[in-house]
Structure formats: C-alpha cells, structure tokens
C-alpha cells in the first residue's frame, strides 16, 4: 500500500457488549468559550509569490515532544470541544451502544490455507485487538487432531500502551519463527520483533524505526525490512537483518535517492524473488533479489519508462505483468522469464477493455484472479493462464463491491472473494476455478439487523461539464422516502486514483434508522470509472473533484433525495481537502460537515519538501516550487488560503497529534483562521486525539467513539439545534 494521504479505513469488527465507553479527557465546562489563537505574521516565501500565515507558529516538527505553547493551545481546543459537545453525551452514548451492540464480540475471520497451515484471526469478548491463530492441515482443511495455537496476541502487545497498531506478520519458510511490526505512536514508525513459535519465547532481536512490511529469505534467518525516512516519515532504505546480529550491522539492500519516488517491497507469489518497486504516480521500476541468496545485489528487471506503470509477479517460471503500456485502464500480459521488460516478447492474457479497469491480480497454479472495476463496481474475473477463457464471479446487486480476499497459497483450488453492498453485510466466498461453484465461508454477523428492511441504489448525477457522476445511496425503507423531507449524509474522497468502494457499515444503520439516507459520491480523482476518471481529477483538473461533489449534492436535492436544509457531508484526509474546498465554494448547501484529518493547507505543504509526503506527491497535485501554473492553481483551491469572512456550515474537525500523513498543524491553523473569519453562529468543533495518528485511535471499540460523536453532532443539527458557538 502506498503511503498516501488517505484516511485509514475504520473497519467495523464484531462485538456484543453494549456498555457505553465514551471517553472524556476531563469534566467538561458547559460555559467554556472557544480558544483564540494569537496571530503572529509569518512570511511563506516561494518563487512565485509570498503569503502571510498568521498561525504558522502552531507548527512543531519535533517527532517526540511538541512545544508547551502548542500543547496548551491544542488542549484548550480539546477542552472546548468536550464542553461544547457535553450536552450530546447521552445521545452519543446511545449511538455508541447501538453500534457496538450490532457487533458480535467473539468473532473472527474465515480460516485460510497457506503452505501446510490454516490461519485466522479472532477476538475474545472485550478485546480491542485481534489474536492471530494457526492450525496444521492440508488443502482440504485443518487437521482435527492438531491443536490450534495463538501465535500473536495484539491485546498482550498493546497492554500499557497509549496507542498500538499491528503492521504486518510473517511466518518463516519452515514455520518455526514469526516476524512482525508494531506501531506504538501512530506515525508509522514501527518496531520489528521476532518470536520463536516452538517455545513461545520472544527473541532479543529488535529493530526500531521501520515501516510495516517484512519478508523472510529462504534460509529462515535473514529478514528484509524498510527503514522509515526520519524526515519525510515515508520509504527509506530497504535493509537485510540476520537473526542474532546487531541491527547496526544490517546491510543496505537498496536506497532510492529520489525523494519524489515511493519504494516498497514484497515477496513474489512463489517466494522465489524479493520484488522491490520504485514508483511515482506516473511510472514504475522493478528490481529483484533472489530469496535463496539474500546477500545478492538487486538487479533491475523492468526499468522505468516515462508514463508507464507496470506491476509484475512471478509463479512457476512465468512473469505476469499488469501494465498501462498502450492501455490506459491496464492490460495483463505474460513476459519473458529472462527479460520481462522485452515488450516484443509479451503475450497478451487479458486485453484492455473499454469501461473496465484492471486494478490488481493474484496468481494461482490453476488460474489468475483479477480485480476489476466497471461502472463504479468492483468485481473479480477468473482468467485461464493462456487467456482463452475468462469469467466474472456473478453478483446480484446494482451498487456493490467485490474484492479479492486473503489468498496466500497459489496451490489453493479456489479464489477467496468478499462481496458487500451498503445494506448487505460482508460475505466471504471461495469460488472454485474448475466448477465455478461458490462456497460460503462467512457472513459478517450484525446483531439485530434485518437487511430486508433496507434498500440501496446506484444513481447518476449530471456534472456541469457533461459527465455522469456515480452516487451510491442507502436507506431504511419504512423510515425514509425520497420526497425532499429527509436528511442525507454524503461522503466523498476523490484522490490518488483510489476508488471509493461501497460496502456495509454497521454504524450507518443508526442514521438510517433515524430517517437519514447515506450516500457516497464517486467523484473524479478516484478510479471509480477507470484511470480516465482519476486523471480528470488530479493536477490542473483537481477542481473537478470539488465540482462533482457539489453537482452530486445539487442532484440529490433536486431529485428529492434530501431535505435542502438538512444535507450533511463528511470526508477524511484527501477527503478532508474535498470538504474544505467545498465549504469555501458552496458551504450554503450543507447543514454540517465532518472534516477529518484534513489536508487543508495544501499550498504551504506542497511548497515544503521537508514535510512528509510532499516530494512524493508533486506528480499528484503539482509542484508549486517549479511551476507558476501549479502554484496559482493550488492557491485557487487550497482551503486554508481561501477562507473568507462569510457564513460556513457547522463543522466537526478532527486531528491526531502524531499524524504522519497530514500533520496536526494543518487542521489546527485551519480552525484558528476559520474561527476568526466566519460570520455565522454555527458550531466549529476541533477534536484533538493527543495519542493517535492519521487513523485515529486503534482499538476496535475506541474507533466507535469517533463515529458516535460525529453521528450525534449531525443528528442534533438535523433537529435544528446548535452545539457550540
């Protein structure tokens, strides 16, 4: 996964206990006034113009401790937020209990086979974090005579930690050792740890400051990992650690000198190669290291070519490549074993097809499973190795998402997929390659939920420039009618070419039960309608994302899907940029907004190469240090730079102090300036998580607090009330 400015998904995991657990930092004072940040003019210099930022002093880049004056201001905002929302505590607790009550507490994932073992995760009642379990067995199933063993317990690891998130877990080739990464702060700086699975003992080897991924070499003693860049907090050098040796002796395998490129790595499907990918949003390069010779130097397998993105994997002596070479929405080819970059020897397996984007693929001994996107729906296609036969796993739904599930072993004779709609809980299936038979492995349990009472639809809104904007919408049939009298919550993202896939959200049921419709606008900038949809919402066409969201809103109101006085909007990270821009451009359309970890100081961030992600993302937003056109265009929509003295909708803005993707000071400055300029009496609430990063708090129950808080905020506004000043 690329280290983008994305909002880490809030996965709704099963629970049954309904005890309210709304966390308050201190006893709220209902009469508390919002803090007023001091104004201290600071000149932001650039080649194409200077600007004054009166709240620049709120920035502190120290990765361990922020200045006292910054903490004092943030604590003041948090105290005000708690005070302003105090009267909503009973409603928030009710919502929290409802959402948590729908979740089966002692639940787990469907077991999956991988090289002689069956693996799954589960939760015990009350657990915030999952346990990873395995049991011996063959392709046909677990061995009933073998004991299941817990190989990693996230709750034990998280004990006494203010923040904990598991990165990745990898078992050694012989199944005797475990390597995993864990983040204890929220800034993606992980620890690499090891465990002896035979004895249960933790090994003394430990490496700090790494990113999530880890890959074992064939010898079962050498491990590849990646250091986190100490400044950009993103991809640093790829390293090799040998168990029993000091981390200071670890070898640098590859270090990309260009800060504008991402570097990532993974094992090939057959565990023969370490695949080192170097990429931007426009081109890629692939290097390989043989896993049976981890000390070997990496060699370039597919060199970088301008505008070409190619993603390769290897199985059974064959390279399969997903490429946009002469195919905007990608095609699948088989490449030569000795030189996969030789295009003259490519054999096409799955050609580019109009309106269908190839997003990913997984290699099996018997077939290739391909993740595609058509008409804003995710689907899975099974393709024979020769490409002569291919078929789509059928789904009976209008607006849905089918995705590739966990498929670790190429020897498996079926592909695992997950399918969901906005009103249908996630269903996990194994689909056989030879018979096409589908085997139900798991349906997400949702306590007390009756899907027959809810409906979903796919709508198409006209854009101002003649496009068709997909909208997915859901509602409860006996509580809502599209007659212009009901509230609606519209969510959006629209960035990085990431499709905004629809799926079932147990929390959304609470809004639908109270007469809301919930909807997703699949705006340009995402890949919901293919790569062209992405390209038409990036760089000098970024404003199409904002226009699409506004046009989708207007369509929903015009067609009776929403009461024009009770339209709500929400988005996080790049979706927070979307919210900020839309609030400036058309804030009068919305009663309230959720603006989460928002990328709102867009121009200042893209002018500063020392800020995490900035150099990587010049190809995404434009480089205002080198292009006056890019500078002026970003300036024209950057939410912080375009705040005005006018009315704005009610807002709930959130941040995490240790956010490594959108630094806390972006929303902090945004709130300070907006609070000073806005001319309305609507609430502006700034909720600061002092022990969290980009994804907020990490426990499965802790996550529900943010959702219940936002829902209470919106429901209160929908009733005509105002929380705060």
Image (tube, helix red, strand yellow):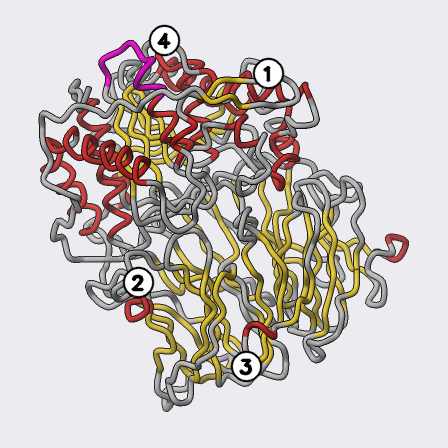
Q: CA distance from mark 3 to mark 4?
A: 61 Å
Residue 483, above or below 104? above
Q: Residue 236 in the image: state x and y as whole percent.
A: 60, 56
Nearer the observer: mark 2 or 3; the answer is: 3
Q: CA distance from mark 2 to mark 3?
A: 28 Å
Q: Secondary structure at mark 4?
A: loop
- First in sequence: mark 4 vs mark 2: 2
Q: Secondary structure at mark 2?
A: loop
Say if the magenta span includes residue 502: no
Q: Residues within 10 Å of mark 2 (few under 14, many from 20)?
A: many
Q: Nearer the viewer, residue 547 or 201?
A: 201
Q: Secondary structure at mark 3?
A: loop
Q: Quadrant of residue 329?
A: top right
Q: CA distance from mark 3 to mark 1?
A: 60 Å
Q: CA distance from mark 2 to mark 1?
A: 47 Å
Q: CA distance from mark 4 to mark 2?
A: 45 Å
Q: CA distance from mark 1 to mark 4?
A: 33 Å
Q: Quadrant of residue 512?
A: top left
Residue 276, above or below 223? above
On residue 645, the disc is: 4
Q: Which residues are magenta?
A: 673-682
Q: Which residue is mark 2?
A: 129
Nearer the observer: mark 1 or 4; the answer is: 4
Left or right: 311 in relation to 29: right
Q: Residue 28 in the image: state x and y as whole percent.
A: 11, 36
Q: Which residue is mark 1?
A: 466
Q: Residues within 10 Å of mark 3 (few under 14, many from 20)?
A: some
């Amino acid at each position: 996964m690329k280290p983008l400015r994305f909002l880490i998904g809030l996965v709704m995991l099963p629970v049954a206990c309904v005890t309210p657990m709304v966390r308050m930092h201190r006893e709220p004072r209902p009469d508390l006034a919002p803090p007023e940040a001091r104004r201290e003019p600071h000149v932001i210099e650039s080649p194409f113009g200077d600007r004054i930022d009166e709240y620049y002093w709120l920035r502190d880049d120290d990765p361990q401790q922020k200045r006292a004056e910054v903490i004092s201001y943030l604590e003041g905002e948090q105290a005000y937020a708690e005070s302003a929302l105090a009267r909503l505590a009973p409603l928030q607790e009710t919502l929290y209990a409802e959402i948590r009550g729908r979740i089966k507490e002692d639940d787990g994932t469907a077991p999956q086979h991988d090289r002689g073992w069956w693996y799954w995760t589960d939760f015990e009642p009350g657990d915030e974090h999952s346990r990873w379990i395995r049991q011996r067995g063959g392709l046909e199933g677990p061995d009933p005579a073998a004991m299941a063993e817990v190989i990693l317990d996230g709750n034990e690891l998280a004990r006494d930690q203010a923040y904990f998130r598991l990165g990745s877990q990898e078992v050694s080739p012989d199944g005797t050792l475990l390597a995993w990464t864990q983040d204890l702060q929220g800034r993606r700086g992980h620890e690499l740890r090891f465990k002896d699975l035979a004895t249960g003992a933790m090994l003394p080897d430990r490496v700090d400051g790494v990113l999530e991924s880890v890959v074992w070499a064939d010898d079962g003693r050498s491990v590849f990992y990646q250091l986190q860049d100490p400044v950009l907090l993103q991809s640093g050098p790829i390293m090799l650690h040998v168990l029993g040796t000091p981390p200071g002796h670890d070898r640098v395998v590859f270090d990309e000198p260009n800060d504008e490129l991402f570097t990532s790595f993974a094992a090939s499907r057959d565990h023969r190669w370490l695949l080192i990918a170097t990429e931007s949003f426009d081109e890629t390069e692939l290097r390989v290291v043989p896993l049976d010779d981890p000390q070997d130097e990496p060699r370039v397998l597919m060199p970088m070519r301008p505008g070409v993105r190619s993603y390769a994997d290897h199985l059974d002596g064959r390279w399969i490549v997903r490429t946009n070479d002469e195919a905007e929405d990608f095609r699948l080819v088989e490449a030569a074993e000795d030189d996969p970059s030789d295009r003259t020897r490519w054999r096409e397996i799955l050609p580019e097809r109009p309106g269908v984007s190839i997003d990913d693929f997984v290699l099996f001994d018997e077939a290739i499973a391909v993740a595609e996107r058509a008409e804003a729906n995710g689907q899975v296609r099974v393709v024979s190795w020769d490409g002569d036969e291919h078929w789509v796993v059928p789904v009976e739904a209008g607006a849905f998402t089918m995705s590739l599930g966990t498929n670790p072993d190429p020897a498996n004779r079926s592909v695992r997929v997950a399918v969901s709609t906005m009103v249908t809980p996630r269903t996990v299936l194994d689909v056989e390659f030879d018979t096409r038979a589908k085997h139900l492995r798991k349906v997400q349990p949702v306590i007390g939920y009756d899907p027959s009472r809810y409906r979903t639809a796919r709508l198409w809104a006209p854009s101002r420039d003649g496009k068709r904007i997909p909208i997915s919408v859901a509602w409860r049939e006996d509580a809502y009618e599209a007659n212009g009298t009901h509230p609606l919550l519209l969510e959006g993202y629209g960035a990085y070419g990431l499709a905004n896939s629809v799926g079932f959200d147990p929390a959304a049921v609470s809004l639908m039960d109270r007469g809301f419709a919930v909807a997703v606008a699949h705006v340009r900038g995402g890949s919901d309608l293919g790569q062209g949809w992405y390209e038409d919402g990036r760089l000098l066409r970024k404003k199409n994302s904002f226009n699409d969201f506004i046009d989708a809103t207007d369509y929903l109101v015009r067609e009776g899907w929403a009461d024009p006085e009770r339209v709500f909007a929400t988005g996080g990270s790049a979706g927070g940029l979307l919210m900020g821009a839309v609030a400036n451009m058309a804030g009068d359309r919305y009663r309230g907004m959720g603006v989460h970890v928002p990328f709102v100081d867009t121009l200042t961030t893209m002018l500063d190469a020392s800020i995490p992600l900035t150099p990587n993302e010049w190809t995404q937003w434009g480089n205002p240090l080198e292009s006056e056109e890019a500078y002026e265009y970003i300036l024209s929509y950057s939410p912080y730079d375009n705040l005005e003295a006018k009315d704005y909708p009610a807002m709930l803005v959130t941040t995490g102090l240790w956010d490594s993707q959108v630094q806390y000071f972006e929303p902090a400055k945004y709130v300070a300036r907006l609070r000073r300029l806005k001319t309305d009496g609507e609430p502006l609430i700034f909720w600061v998580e002092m022990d969290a990063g980009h994804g907020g708090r990490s426990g499965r129950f802790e996550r529900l607090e943010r959702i219940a808080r936002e829902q209470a905020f919106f429901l209160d506004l929908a009733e005509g009330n105002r929380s705060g000043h």
